[in-house]
Amino acid sequence: MKLKNIFFTGLIAVIGLSGCDEVANPIKSKQIIGILPTTPPSDTNSSKNPNVYKMLLEDCTGHLCTNCPLAATDAEAVLRSSFGNQVILMEDNVGFDAIPQDTVNGCRLGAFLTDYRCVAGNNWCTDFNMNSVGFPYGMTNREGAEIGHSTFVLYNNYYDSCNTLVTIRNTTPAVTIDIHDSVWTSPRIMGATFKLNFLKTLSGGSYLLETCIVEDSIEDWQDDNGVFDSTYMKRYTLRGSFDLNGNGVTIPVTTAGTLWTSFQTYNFTTGENGRAGGTANSKPWNIANCYIVAFVYSSGENTNNPWEIVQAEMIKIAPHLHP
């Protein structure tokens, strides 16, 4: 009798464990597998202080750029400064120093095979002729940019350049960007709502909203002043854009008082032509370390300030679970 009771007690325990899930709100995967969300997210994970003016600092880098760690250090110093909460940092792996290499003299075979470039970054590299100068350097709001040329900022000028922009424009922003995101942890699908509120009229031509995925704290090989560092920490690395090519979405109306919302989705398995889900030489992107970066910029045909970014925003992607 005791053995019988033990058997049934064990059976009940097994059934109970098989029906349990450590996640408070378990996912019903059959409802969402392979299906991108079609409605805006309902959660409250949204931008912090979206009504504050924010600029974009792009640190143009590559894993074989020997001085790029110095630039990254300067960029992080900007984020720690008194105005750092108004600077969005994005590291663009672009150009010849970002090309994967199977063999690098003095380093183990295959150390630099991971390709951190992306379609959008490659396009911007071509558009702004980023290979025309030696790395590292950056762009602040892409000011002065035009097809075939960009006004580059040397890394030791990051602080002064960003401080000047924030000081000059530290008034009510022309447009605010409020981001609400939603992540399905299985199968790595996300929907995000971008709410734009135009407080001032933007003139001179069309404006666009660009939305990107960046991943923070990626540990990998880096040439650091001639020393190959296998534990180098890459910060806010551009992984790709929602529209793949980095062209953005045209905003229909940009007059003061206008509200415009764009709902967009991203698939962390098939994104960036499948690289988001991992390749033979790289791991899948870590959603827990990913952020959304969004910025409003003027088109190349704009008669005022072509390509210039007028407002930027960033939000950490929270791995919410949805039924």
Image: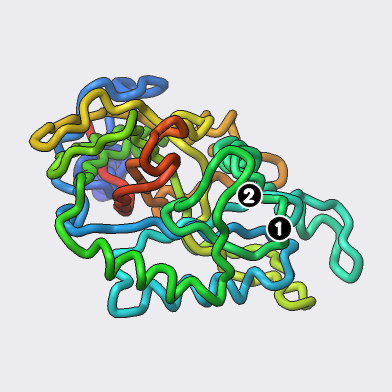
Type of residue at label 2?
A: Tyr
* Quarter of the image that includes the C terminus: top left
Q: Position of residue 105 (x, y in %)?
A: 91, 66
Furthest-left residue in view?
Answer: 257
Task: Indicate the quadrant where residue 88 lies.
Answer: bottom left
Type of residue at label 1?
A: Val
What residue does disc 1 label? 133
Residue 269 is marked as none
Q: Position of residue 167 (x, y in %)?
A: 27, 70
Q: Position of residue 280 (x, y in %)?
A: 71, 41
Residue 116 is marked as 2
Task: Indicate the quadrant where residue 7 lies.
Answer: top left
> Label 2 to label 1, Cα distance in Å?
20 Å
Say which element carries label 1.
loop
Q: Position of residue 233 (x, y in %)?
A: 57, 68
Q: Please report the residue visible at 39 percent of the width from the left and 53 percent of the height from the top.
A: 288
What color scheme is it? rainbow
* Quarter of the image that includes the N terminus: top left
Furthest-front residue in view?
Answer: 303
**Which sits in the foreground, 94 or 165?**
165
**Which sits in the foreground, 292 or 270?**
292
Task: Using the rendered image of the protein, determine whether residue 210 is visible from the camera's viewpoint.
Answer: yes
Say which element carries label 2.
loop
Q: Please report the residue visible at 44 percent of the width from the left and 75 percent of the height from the top.
A: 159
Crowding at mark 1 (Cα within 10 Å: few <14, some 14-19, many 20+): few
Q: Disc 2 or 1, which lies upstream in sequence?
A: 2
Q: Is residue 93 left or right of residue 183?
A: right
Q: Please report the residue visible at 45 percent of the width from the left and 59 percent of the height from the top.
A: 140
Q: Is residue 264 left or right of residue 110?
A: left
Give the foreground label among 2 and 1. Answer: 1
Task: Using the rendered image of the protein, determine whether residue 187 is visible from the camera's viewpoint.
Answer: no
